[in-house]
Image (cartoon, rainbow, N blue to C red):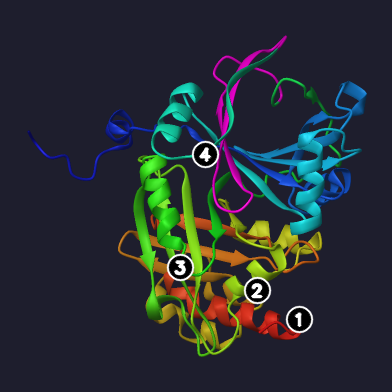
Amino acid sequence: MTEILNPTPTTARQADPFPVKGMDAVVFAVGNAKQAAHFYATAFGMKLVAYSGPENGSRETASYVLVSGSARFVFTSVIKPSGPWGRFLADHVAEHGDGVIDLAVEVPDARAAYAYAVEHGATGIEEPHDVKDEHGTVVLASIRTYGDTRHTFVERSGYDGPYLPGYVAAKPIVQGPEKRLFQAIDHCVGNVELGHMDEWVAFYNRVMGFTNMKEFVGDDIATEYSALMSKVVADGTRKVKFPLNEPALGKKKSQIDEYLEFYGGPGVQHIALATNDIVATVRAMRAAGVQFLDTPDSYYDTLGDWVGDTRVPIETLRELKILADRDEDGYLLQIFTKPVQDRPTVFFEMIERHGSMGFGKGNFKALFEAIEREQEKRGNL
């Protein structure tokens, strides 16, 4: 038998015990879905495409579906909890604030995905079931992951509606930008408690057939005051990537400790969004009121020495506070928002890749020092 090294995506998919097509949606539980939808339409340039609420039969919840390229966000809030789902959402927002409840993954066969996951130790939430309307049939199934987060497996090849059965097409909330600000979900990062990162890495290895992509420990992610450890798991085609963080011992409270305290346990920390033009994206988002982490000018004084030439001149990176990193495969440009709600929990990353499949290792110290400055302002360092 010949061993296959560095398999192509096609070969990897054929050999993958748990094939996936990509991220289907990031689903948020929020206090006011209508206002959240307006924020992401105006500040992130996303387009409202579907809605579910009392007007079309959903008496308990209201949900708004927004897209930008292949990235899909769903914002759901409770109108009046009358059943298990409504009570779960209401309790989730009370305990965690606005946050991610579901990292939904599109799969070619939801029944097979669920069966494989449960057989390998996952806890099922919803067994596979068909959901139908005039647009066709979607097969859904869900399992638990860290904290109160779930993964819903979505099989939608037989469906051509705006999102899922029960949703109707909706008109855009505002006139969006001429050019979309991002086109895909690059990765979704989860924070777990001290000592539990390897447990969840093993969970994804075993339950979803994901492999370990990157590992950052020790001095990789540390400052004078705080540290964390991180490992990245991904499917065979690298379309779905889940970095997992846990706090490490330090002189003061790390960003992961702060998140766990204010979120009330493990959960999704940030979502990285892939853009083809980070300069235009950051300019548009800043103009719409999005706040980004600051980076000292001194970071840019030597940046060109180790990053080399990039598509964006150093002075433009300095102006917009965009970070850059290079590895053996190429380079990337990235920037992080401040938390997008009152609690210092969920935030976003904008990332532009040019060959590199890394996560900005060279920027970890600068990034964490920027986060620590914000923690100190909040009195949480």
Number of numbered discs? 4
Foreground tag (1 vs 2): 2
Give the numbered dot on residue 378.
Answer: 1
Which of the 4 image quadrants contains residue 34?
A: top right
Q: Could you tell me how far apart the alpha carbons at marks 3 and 2 are, in whole angstroms?
A: 16 Å
- The residue carrying pointer 1 sits among few (fewer than 14), some (14 to 19) or many (20 or more) residues within 10 Å by Cα, namely few
Dot 3: what SS? loop
Q: Position of residue 151 (x, y in %)?
A: 56, 40
Upstream in sequence: badge 4 or badge 3:
4
Q: Cβ–Cβ below 8 Å for labels 4 and 3?
A: no
**Amino acid type indicated by mark 3:** Gly
Seen at 37% across and 64% down, the residue is 215
Task: List the residue tagged with mark 3.
Answer: 195
Task: List the residue tagged with mark 4.
Answer: 123
Residue 135 drawn in magenta? yes
Nearest the viewer among 40 and 76 is 76
**Amino acid type indicated by mark 2:** Glu
Relative side of 159 to 17, left or right: right
Q: Which residues are magenta?
A: 133-162
Upstream in sequence: badge 4 or badge 1:
4
Dot 2: what SS? helix
**Amino acid type indicated by mark 1:** Arg
Q: Position of residue 5 (x, y in %)?
A: 18, 44
The C terminus is located in which quarter? bottom right
Relative side of 323 to 201, left or right: right
Relative side of 179 to 145, left or right: right
Which of the 4 image quadrants contains residue 105?
A: top right
Q: Position of residue 4 (x, y in %)?
A: 16, 39
